[in-house]
Amino acid sequence: MRRLAATVTLVTTSDAQGQRYGMLATSVTSVAMEPPMLLVCVSRSAHLHPALMARKRMCINVLRDEQAELVRAFSSSLPYEERFAVADWDHHADFQLPYLPHAQALFFCDIAQVIEAGTHSVVIARVLESRAIDAVRPMVYVDGGMSQLAAGAA
């Protein structure tokens, strides 16, 4: 599995009281263009899982190659809310979700379907809104480490 290169994302949600939750994910992929849908695999043991299943709404923050500090924070033993102190976060007023305004791309989604598979929930999400920055420099995870991939690279 370590040889499957994947874009690094940070999946975020919040609960009814406004508590923020976040989880690193590399198992995110496009499902359909009409309507736009994404698939995200979420471990049922993840701290975010109960809040995500209750809220049924999330933001997929596609990380840029220079956002390694977020990977370190969200894969550390820092208390969950302290992980959000690592970067400047914003809050989407309409969707009530935390997001990284300087992420490579953002996908604000509602859960359309959940399929249980082994230790994970396979979440199929309908994209409600998306945003992207001009520079294409995604953070890529491969063979246990982070790598850079330039747009248009052969």
Image (tube, rainbow, N blue to C red):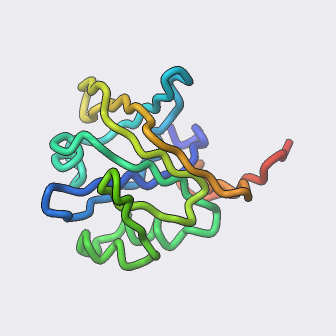
Q: Measured from the top left, where is residue 146 in percent x and y?
A: 59, 59
Q: Is residue 143 visible?
A: no
Relative to the observer, which residue lies in front, 41 or 87? 87
Residue for point 40% across, 31% down = 126
| Vertical placement of residue 146 versus 36, above or below | below
Quadrant of the rendered image containing residue 5: top right
Quadrant of the rendered image containing residue 121: top left
Quadrant of the rendered image containing residue 72: bottom left
| Vertical placement of residue 131 versus 154, above or below | below
Q: Is residue 3 left or right of residue 91?
A: right
Q: Is residue 49 left or right of residue 2?
A: left
Relative to the observer, which residue lies in front, 92 or 88? 92
Q: Is residue 77 visible?
A: yes
Q: Is residue 90 left or right of residue 47?
A: right
Residue for point 34% across, 59% down = 93
| Vertical placement of residue 128 versus 78, above or below | above
Relative to the observer, which residue lies in front, 60 or 9? 60
Relative to the observer, which residue lies in front, 121 or 118? 121
Q: Measured from the top left, where is residue 149 in percent x and y?
A: 73, 52
Residue for point 44% across, 48% down = 60
Q: Measured from the top left, where is residue 94 in percent x and y?
A: 34, 53
Q: Is residue 4 left or right of residue 119?
A: right
Q: Measured from the top left, where is residue 50 in percent x and y?
A: 16, 46
Residue for point 37% across, 79% down = 85
Quarter of the image that includes the C terminus: top right
